[in-house]
Amino acid sequence: MFKKDVTPGAKTKVKSSAQRGIRAKVTETYPLLEPYIDDILPKKEQLDLVKLPDRVSLYALGTTPLFFQHMDDALLPHLALVHKYPACFARVRIDRGAIRFVLSGAALMAPGLTSAGGRLPDPSVADEDEYAYGKEDLPAGAVVVVEAEGKENACMVGVLKMGTKDIKEKKKGAALEAGHYLGDGLWRLSLD
Amino acid sequence: MAEAESASRPSGSFPKQVLYCGVCSLPSEYCEFGGTTKKCEEWLLQADPELHGRLYSQDAIEANMAALSVDAQKRAEKDAQKKAAKAEAAAAREQEKKATSKVVIKRVERNKRKFVTEVTGLEAHGLDLKKVAKDFGKKFATGSSVTKMPGGGEAITVQGDVSDDIYDYLVEIYPGIPEDNVECVEDKKKKGG
């Protein structure tokens, strides 16, 4: 989505009613974030809306970007936020070979997730296992954070194009498209 | 109050602090994919020697290599080289552009004894014209704005004759601009216009 450098457009203040709406939506889509919601979106702080090209809007608190949204799609967390609260999102993991493709902006393909280094939610794996990436299969359209083999921090955020079950069965095709990855235009965007 | 609250929270680990590379802005563990790995490594050695030891030790590199097949390794290697070359070329070009591009401070006669000062060429040094214009306005207590030039491009127009002051200010505040590249010129309106 942000392969090219993005130039921020007008910065406007979000109405407090709209701000409440965003808060509600965030807690709804990411229930695990709820304990920290007051840190992320303090009730009294003024949220800013920054318009980006291609009808993407970015919500930011001061100079820290928080969430972005394409038209009225799901609110996606900015990677800086993901790095702060890594365990609060649905996660998958890719193998090492796929990292360089992801970081240069390619669509994430299924084999990167299904190979030995990749992880997908799997009902058959025990909770304590280090391979645990959740038990529930995620449907297509779910927001996932993509982590990488051997790395602590996430490298991509996006919307699943295929359900994780399909990915495991087919092992082919694009699993995630047009996400926000490390080093893309949105990542390099500075708000000040 | 909010601060006290977050400090007393027991869970401790959140929000997690991540160190971002000062060179390529990625989290340090991803520097190896950025193309400026060498510089990133040097930077990290300064910023966080402990993490540097963990990421760039021989063991870590070998472990990374082992995870890939030989074929994939070769391809990754080639790709990385290409990327590094590209990044280097871009950096060199940037440097060159910076070295050659001039900042021109021009005094333009507006009305016999009245002048405006036009500053051009700042954008080549990576400055945001809008912000610099605001700074000029604040510093010299005059109107200052970004205007479009007839020949294309943009200039900062400051009201009043402040060309010498701007010269000093620029040299002092922005060390990225070599002093030799800043030039003051005077532009008189032709008579009988």
Image (cartoon, coloured by chain):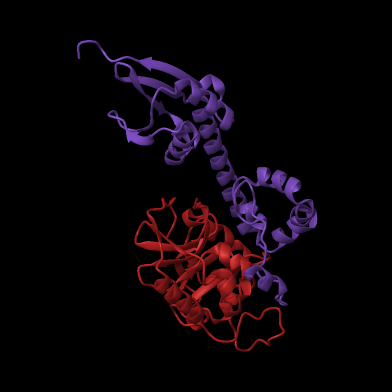
Q: Nearer the viewer, residue B82 or A24?
A: A24
Q: Position of residue B54 (x, y in %)?
A: 77, 57
Q: Nearer the viewer, residue A168 or A103?
A: A103
Q: Position of residue B56 (x, y in %)?
A: 75, 52
Q: Position of residue B60 (x, y in %)?
A: 76, 58
Q: Quadrant of residue B158?
A: top left
Q: Nearer the viewer, residue B57 or B8?
A: B8
Q: Residue drawn at (29%, 16%), measured in percent from left and top? A: B112
B110 up-or-down from A133: above or below? above
Q: Nearer the viewer, residue B165 or A53?
A: B165
Count of marks, rendered view: 0
Q: Position of residue A168 (x, y in %)?
A: 53, 80
User: Taking B177 as reference, is B123 left or right?
Assistant: left
Q: Residue furthest left?
A: B193
Q: Residue drawn at (72%, 74%), measured in percent from left and top? A: B8
Q: Residue drawn at (60%, 88%), measured in percent from left and top? A: A123
User: Taking A108 as reference, is A32 left or right?
Assistant: right
A3 up-or-down from B176: above or below? below
A164 up-or-down from A103: above or below? below
Q: Residue drawn at (70%, 76%), measured in percent from left and top? A: B9
Any part of residue A161 in sight: no
Q: Quadrant of residue A73?
A: bottom left
Question: What is the drawing colour of chain A?
Answer: red
Any part of residue A12 in sight: yes
Point out the image quarter for the N terminus of chain A: bottom left
Question: What is the drawing colour of chain B?
Answer: purple
A45 up-or-down from B76: above or below? below
